[in-house]
Amino acid sequence: MFDIAFSELAIVMLVALMVIGPERLPKVARTLGHLWGRVQRYVQNVKNEISNDMVIEEARKLQQNIRQEASSIGNTLQETGLTLEQHILQAHHKAKQDEVPPTIPATAVPHASDKTDQ
C-alpha cells in the first residue's frame, strides 16, 4: 500500500525517538501497534460484510431466477395438460361419432310369423 523504504523508516524512527523520548517511545509504539491492529480488523470486517452482502444478493437473484423458471415450467405443464385433455376429449368425441349403432341379432327378436303359429 505504502512504498516506504527501510532508510525512510529508520529516519522516522529516529525522529520519533527524539520527539517522544526514550521513556515514552515503547508505550507509544505499543499503542500504535494496537491501533494498527484495530484498523486492520475493522477493514477485514468491512470486507467480510461486503462479501457477505454480495453473496446474499447473488442468492436472492438465484432464488428469483429459480422461482421464475419454476413458474414457467408450471405454466408449460398446465398448458400441456390442457392440450392433452383436449386431444383426449376430441378423440373420444370422434370415436363416439364413428361408432356404428349396435344391431340386434335376428334370433333375439321374435318374428311376427312365430306369434301366429302358436
Image (cartoon, grey):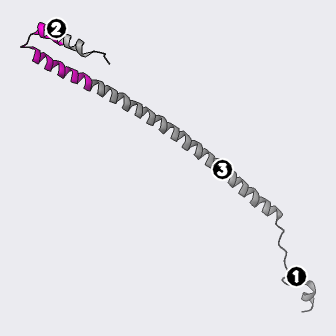
Disc 1 residue type (three-letter): Ala
Above or below residue 20? Residue 68 is: below
Q: Position of residue 7 (x, y in %)?
A: 23, 13
Above or below residue 107? Residue 47 is: above
Residue 80, disc: 3
Horizontal side, residue 52 vs residue 42: left or right: right
Q: Is residue 82 magenta?
A: no
Q: Quadrant of the C terminus?
A: bottom right
Residue 106, disc: 1
Q: Position of residue 88 (x, y in %)?
A: 71, 58
Which portion, as a residue range, is magenta? 13-41
Above or below residue 14? Residue 111 is: below
Q: Position of residue 102 (x, y in %)?
A: 82, 72
Question: At 90% across and 84% down in the image, what residue appears?
Answer: 111
Residue furthest toward the left?
A: 23
- Alpha carbon of mark 2 to alpha carbon of mark 1: how far? 130 Å
